[in-house]
Amino acid sequence: MSRFRLQPTPAQEAALAEHCAHARHVWNLAVEQHAHWKPGRKMAPGFAEQCRQLTEARAASPWLAAGSVVVQQQALKDFAQAMANFFGGTHRRPTWRKRGRAEGFRIVAVKAGDVRRRSRNTGEVKIPKVGWVRFRWSRAIPDGAKSYRVTRDRAGRWHVAFATVPQPIPVPGTGQVVGVDRGVAVSAALSTGELLNVRGLRDTEKARLRRLLRKLARAKRGSNRRTKVKTAIARLKAREADRRKDWVEKTSTDLARRFDVIAVEDLKIRNMTRTARGTLDAPGRNVRQKAGLNRGILAAGWGRLVQRLEQKAPGRVQKINPRHTSQTCNACKHVASESRESQALFLCVACGHQDHADVNAAKNMRDTAAGHAAAARGGLPLGGPVNREPQPDLPSAA
């Protein structure tokens, strides 16, 4: 999606918030309907039946009738797609939506005249029952956009995103293969020796965030002071997320333009970032350390980087088995955990080869993807033949 920053007036902002409330209300009604379904009961209503029920609800509720039927129907359409994704096994089951979280709605059947440019840096988009709303024209509107989504984040910022399917980045044709090792201290280490890091909050911003969190802990629930503090925290968090997304977009585009094949570790990030808190009967150990590691993994944007690489360079991303990639010497292929001297230093105990630990792992992934080496004690991770050291010729028995 191509996202742009909306600049609504106070009256338009109130109308947009009303659209979000209608979409959230319809979505929650659909969730409630499907929550009552159990095996053996009558099938829960589908999209067509829910649209007929929506017509009856609009006739009985002046509040719903005052809103846009397009917004409300598209909320039901989004819910139907969410249920299809759940049954397909690609997403979790859709849950309740809460005010202030994931606010937004979708508009379809967008015409060419519904978006216009007012000046060099300003454009306008036509939203039903709201009118023309200005947005910052930061780049060209993609051709062929038939729908757009209006969203509001926790920091109170409004955005409009035009849905289009961009063309993949063409293959450079250089034949080069690169390995990308994702980490916490170094966000992405390339086999070329480049060390890339996500630009997070500055030290002054981190100190302000700590002060705000202490302030939030002292604020009374439901008070105006607590609301202001939460908004200030959300703005800092949004700034950090924007920088992470910007880094992911620029890094993925650069890799897709420079290399034919991109090798990454096949990591189960959801399992890696699972909490270690445990239960009352079996409490976890090193919970605070594990929570800090989880925050570092999520802040490095591991999952989003691979997702954008697969979208920009389809068919050119190879996922490598991560087993022993950080313990294998890229020079002599000797595997030993003792070679990992520290987080940053790799010193092979067999041949003395020295390199940055993350760069060494990235080179192993590059070689595995290129088919030049076997990973971890023999055998390609995709099930190739097992490699063995040459055996001396033994005399045959008489």
Image (cartoon, rainbow, N blue to C red):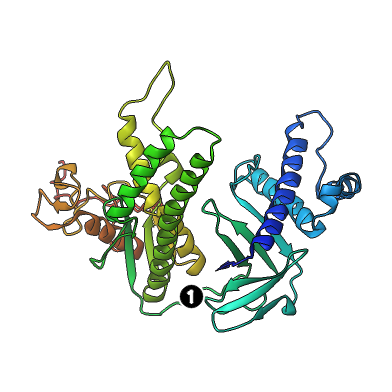
Asked if residue 11 can be seen in this view, the reply is: yes
Residue 380 in the image: x percent, y percent?
A: 35, 53
- Which residue is at a point 14% across and 46% down the rendered structure image? 341
User: Which residue is at the front of the view, 90 or 25?
Assistant: 25
User: Which residue is at the front of the view, 351 or 122?
Assistant: 122
Q: Amino acid at mark 1?
A: Ile
Q: Name the quadrant containing residue 243.
A: bottom left
Disc 1 on helix, strand or loop?
Answer: loop
Residue 352 in the image: x percent, y percent?
A: 8, 54
**Tag count:** 1
Residue 228 in the image: x percent, y percent?
A: 49, 46
Asked if residue 141 can be seen in this view, the reply is: no
* Left or right of residue 122, residue 183 in this image: left
Q: Name the quadrant containing residue 123.
A: bottom right
- Which residue is at a point 34% across and 59% down the rendered structure image? 198
* Left or right of residue 369, residue 164 in this image: right
User: Which residue is at the front of the view, 169 or 248?
Assistant: 248
**Which residue is labeled 1 in the image?**
169
* Left or right of residue 129, residue 179 in this image: left
**Residue 3 in the image: above or below residue 59:** below
> From this viewpoint, which residue is outermost toward the top?
281
* Left or right of residue 153, residue 253 in this image: left
- Which residue is at a point 65% across and 59% down the rendered structure image? 13
**Residue 291 in the image: above or below residue 79:** above
**The C terminus, quarter of image:** top left
Crowd class of label 1 (few under 14; some 14 to 19; many from 20; radius 10 Å): some
Residue 354 in the image: x percent, y percent?
A: 12, 57
> From this viewpoint, which residue is outermost toward the left?
352
> From this viewpoint, which residue is outermost toward the front?
224
**Residue 276 in the image: above or below residue 337:** above
**The N terminus, quarter of image:** bottom right
